[in-house]
Amino acid sequence: MTPRAKKSGPQAPRIDEIRLGGLEPGDPAELLRGARLDGLAFAGVDLGELDLNGASVMECTLTDVGADEADLRSLRLRDCSITQARFPSVRGGRGDWRDVRVEGARIGSAELYENHWGSVHFVDCKITYLNLRGATLRDVAFTRCSIEELDLGEATAQSLAFHGSTLQILDLQRAELKDVDLRGAELHKIVGLDRLRGVTVSSAQLGQLAPLLAAEFGIGIDDTTPAEIP
């Protein structure tokens, strides 16, 4: 038997399909700090403040949910779908998300530092500032997203991909990366170029990064012909 050729390129994120059925309608009054929510569907919720600090939300959907401020600190999400969320300001440090899909969200500043994410998929989202500093990310994908600034400083990321997405500023300072695929991203500025080990880019992107890499590592670029030594 001929051995199977090893697939080239980074390991793609493994995003598990979220199947939710038979959910009960959720009462917005149940969206409380420290709540334990399971098998509920919330729709058309518009709050001044959404406080889910320390809550556990499992097998739930949140559709057309808006809040001026969202406190998601230490939030535990499992098998959840969040659609058309509108959060100008999110505080969500030290959360734990697994098998979560966020689609069509409009988010301003999202402080999600030191989160643990597994099988998380953002689709068609617009985010001004996404702070994942110190986070642990595995099997995470951004599809057709626009992110003005993504902070992955000191983060550990494995199997992270961007498809048809725009990143104005990507901060990789002191990050540890493996199988991070930037080929599907439109990149404008990268901070922390010395942390690109473990990242895959296209040849076109490499050409765009060349001047930045040269400046980072002190490489001079001069296309003039050197004078002959007599």
Image: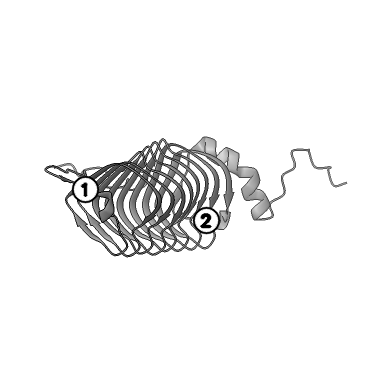
Q: Residue at x 51, y 60 (%)?
A: 153
Callout 2 crowding tier (Cα within 10 Å): few <14, some 14–19, many ≥20: many
The percent position of residue 199, horizontal first and vertical second, equals 45, 50
Q: Residue at x 18, y 41 (%)?
A: 2
Label disc, if present, on residue 135 of the rendered structure: none
Q: Residue at x 29, y 62 (%)?
A: 55
Q: Residue at x 74, y 38 (%)?
A: 223
Q: In the picture provided, is 140 more to the left or to the right than 68?
A: left
Label disc, if present, on residue 26 of the rendered structure: 1
* The one of 172 and 197 positioned closer to us in this rendering: 172
The percent position of residue 91, horizontal first and vertical second, equals 44, 58
SS label for mark 2: loop
The percent position of residue 116, horizontal first and vertical second, equals 34, 61
Kind of residue at disc 1:
Gly
User: Disc 2 versus disc 1: distance between alpha carbons?
Assistant: 39 Å
Considering every residue shown, the one lying at the far left of the view is 22
Q: In the picture provided, is 21 more to the left or to the right than 127?
A: left
Report the quarter where the N terminus lies.
top left
Q: Is residue 36 above or below residue 43?
A: below
Q: In the picture provided, is 86 more to the left or to the right than 18?
A: right
Mark in front: 2 vs 1: 1
* The one of 99 and 26 positioned closer to us in this rendering: 26
Asked if disc 2 and disc 1 are in contact, CB closer than 8 Å, the reply is no
The percent position of residue 168, horizontal first and vertical second, equals 56, 42
Number of on-image labels:
2
Callout 1 crowding tier (Cα within 10 Å): few <14, some 14–19, many ≥20: some
* The one of 129 and 64 positioned closer to us in this rendering: 64
SS label for mark 1: loop
Kind of residue at disc 2:
Leu
Sequence order check, earlier mark of 2 and 1:
1
Q: In the picture provided, is 79 more to the left or to the right than 209?
A: left
* Residue hosting label 2: 172
